[in-house]
Image (tube, rainbow, N blue to C red):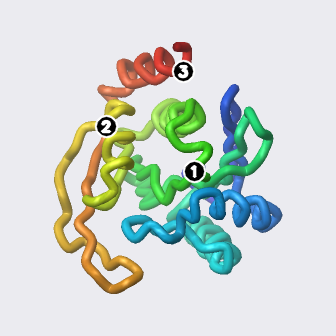
Amino acid sequence: MNSFVEPISLNGRHASLEPLSHRHHDDLVEATRDGELWKLWYTSVPSPEGMSAEIERRLALQQAGLMLPWSVRSGASGKIVGMTTYMNIDATYRRVEIGSTWYAKSAQRTALNTECKLMLLTHAFESLACIAVEFRTAFFNHASRRAIERLGAKQDGILRSHQLYTDGSLRDTVVFSIIAGEWPPVKRHLQFKLDR
């Protein structure tokens, strides 16, 4: 197994990232019910009934060398509150996308997200020697776009008619990235936000 998909735990004050496991199923179902996230048309958050299949899908992509999935545990509550991944992994050119991320409504817009991104970016740039880390989101997911910009990522462009939503309509995808040369000031910015 290459180091880009080797399971690893990442721990901080506000959150911990644990390698995704079927044992997280019930907690993830509870988390997705907080805000009924699967009902948001512009996201692809698994429904309670679809959680087992989503865990299996992510673990299969990990076995194929394409994804490294985590469950997100809140430091405040001790509960599993969401999922995140490295995806679209390109180990040859040392690039990953941080994506397929969702958090329970009560965990959104908290220090948890900032710290998760800091841990994921630190691992990508400092352990895996990535040259770039991407973020992608739906054009109409304005909250996600603002959150990605607050991290310090820059918009690369919009992939028009890039994917299909579950209802069959076309999704425009907004692509952002942080490149290795930008990492030191982005890291300082995220640490400053967490220390405030």
What's the residue at 50%, 19% (across, down)? 191
Residue 85 lies, in percent from the top left, at 54, 54
Residue 181 seen from this side: yes
Residue drawn at x 20%, y 63% as measured from the top left: 159
**Disc 1/disc 3 C-alpha distance (Å):** 20 Å
Q: Nearer the viewer, residue 170 or 3?
A: 170
Which quadrant of the view contains residue 2? bottom right
Residue 127 appears in view: no
Q: Element under label 2?
A: helix
- Choose the circle earlier in sequence order: 2 or 1: 1
Label 1: element kind: helix
Query: Which residue in the protein does label 1 denote?
Result: 105
Crowdedness of circle 1 by 10 Å Cα count: few (<14), some, many (20+)?
Answer: some
Q: Nearer the viewer, mark 1 or mark 3?
A: 1
Label 3: which residue?
194
Q: What residue does disc 2 label?
A: 149
* Residue count near mark 2 (Cα–Cα under 10 Å), binned few <14, some 14–19, many ≥20: some
Nearest to the eye among marks 2 and 1: give it: 1
Camera-side residue: 11 or 44? Answer: 44
**Are the residues flagged by discs 1 and 3 in contact, CB closer than 8 Å?**
no
Q: Measuring 65% from the left and 69% from the top, which residue is drawn there?
A: 59
Residue 68 in the image, given as x and y percentages of width and height: 58, 57
Residue 155 position within the rendered picture, expressed as x and y whole percent measured from the top left: 22, 43
N-terminal label among 1 and 3: 1
